Amino acid sequence: MHASINDNEETDDILKILKKTFPSIYAYEILGTVDQANAYGVKLVVTEQRLQSDHNDARNLDAGVCHSSSLTRKCLYLKRVNAERYCHKPWGDLRRTLTYIRTEVRFYKEFLPILRESHAAKFGRWSNWTIAPNCLLADYDLSNLIPEEECAMTLETRKNEPTSRKVPHYDEDDVGDLFQKSGFILLDAVLDQKDFEHDHARLNVPKKELSDDIYYVQKSPLQPISAKLTLEALAIFHSTSFEKEKLLEKASRRLCIHGGSYHLSIRNPLELENIESSWSSFLSAFSHLHDKVSQEDTDTTNLTKEENEGKNASIRETLIPHGFFNTPSIQNLGTRMKKIAVYVSKQLSPTYKDKYATIVHGDYKAMNIFLPSNHCSPTTVNKENNQKNCIIFPPLLIDFASVGVGFGMIDVAMHIVHAVLPEDQENHGELSLVKYYLACLHECLEKVNSKNFNALSDSGKKVISVENFKSPYTIDESMRHYKLACIDYLRFIMGRFWKTASVESFHKLKSSMNFSLLNRDIVAAVVFIKKVDGYMTDVEKEMQQD
């Protein structure tokens, strides 16, 4: 789809946004669109006309006369939320959609520059890491819908809202108060393989030479080597705001007071209220499974032939114990979850003053990460001297709609269960990933502490700034948070998705990389349920002691 500048430009919303950044825009081409539940994305190429003055003619230069021009092209990604587009949603759901885009706009404008500066020149090959794609422009207008001074409100704070505050008027036939209310983020597009090969084709680069260049990929599930890279990126991201009280206080006001797309405080209350019936439905759909499942159910999801090589399907077959669904603790899982959900959520809801608090991503699934195309090949050959050199580039993170204050382990737990196959978590594989994240986080914090320790007082003695000193995230406390986060994530999956789950729905979503493995791989779901069952028993004992 091509769009050139014409007399109807005022009716072109995309063009209005682009002209704010590219005043000399000549045309744009839409390469593709992404339509999600809470946002609409457009990948496009902008062609801009650059005018060149004739410097040999001073009279023309003074008069601003240009005798030649050149066209430049730039690939962009535009994320949009137009309130009118979602007028079918009830206000509670629409409000959440609108606060998502507002939170993300605020993150890019008010927080990302600070986080980038915080880690600059501290972490070796990560020293120039931009964390996210470059943002060219971001803005929103939600006036008269959501008060600007309010953070992303929790259910508890909504209960205390002034009764005089009216619900906006709108319906599917009349957008009413939603008219022209929207938000957008304009980013440099991340180069994927299709874009990369297209650009090289225009330049007549032989395809055999493409292997030496780097582009970015999105994939799920992740191999352990990929998961380590994404967890390393996560650790550095968390370290940039770890226990920084002033920054976290601002984040609690301007972002989400409790970070996380599945935090209980922002979910529909019906999810928890009906969780027992959701679990009963899940049992009815899957309890017929025997200790061995079919080859179709045990196939590793979305792995290439090379990645699948060496995978033993019999390992997956043994991961569902005989009679698993008939055990009392599993039969009563819905009731148990309902009793402990609020307690678990409170344990995972730090204030900006609390120990270990940081800014969390909130939706750290594999598809919200762009990985460098060579990330599974840690070395490449230097053709001049035949030496192997590591040239792995850092990944890029996207979708900061749920960013806010929290414990880092909520991101770690979601990430591992969302995208790491259960057989890769066996034999301490899961624990090794958690420990790898902690090792990376502690290394980052040690650098910060070392910088603080090396500061000199007026008397020339080394001093430590108590305010800036970062305490280690101990293994005991971090693993407690990790287990709680696993319980919390299962609560979200049970209440949000498993009411209508079936063998057919799992099979339909089998190749949908944007969905959690818990919704498309029954073996992954059972293994996670089995693990969380034990975690819930520990929490139940903890609650009895309290």
Image (cartoon, rainbow, N blue to C red):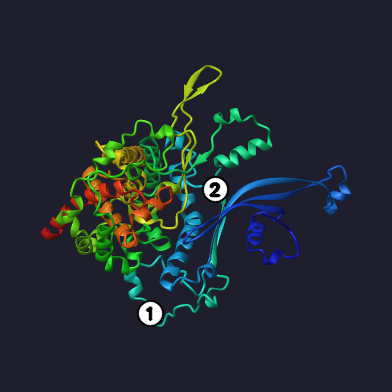
Horizontal side of 267 relative to 105 (left or right) equals: left
Q: Is residue 245 visible?
A: no
Q: Which residue is mark 1?
A: 162
Local secondary structure at mark 2: loop
- Mark 2 or 1, nearer chain start: 2
**Which residue is at the front of the view, 81 or 127?**
81
Quadrant where the image shows the N terminus: bottom right
Against 288, is 379 above or below? above
- Dividing the picture into quadrants, the one containing residue 195 is top right
Picture coordinates of residue 379, whole percent (x, y): 45, 26
Q: In the rendered view, tell whether residue 170 sits above or below residue 300.
A: below
Residue identified by numbered label 2: 134
For the point 65% across and 62% down, the residue is 16
Q: What amino acid is labelled 2 in the image? A: Asn
Q: Residue at x 70, y 45 (%)?
A: 72
In this view of the protein, which residue sits in the foreground, 351 or 503? 503
- Amino acid type, residue under disc 1 in the picture: Pro
Q: Residue at x 45, y 61 (%)?
A: 100
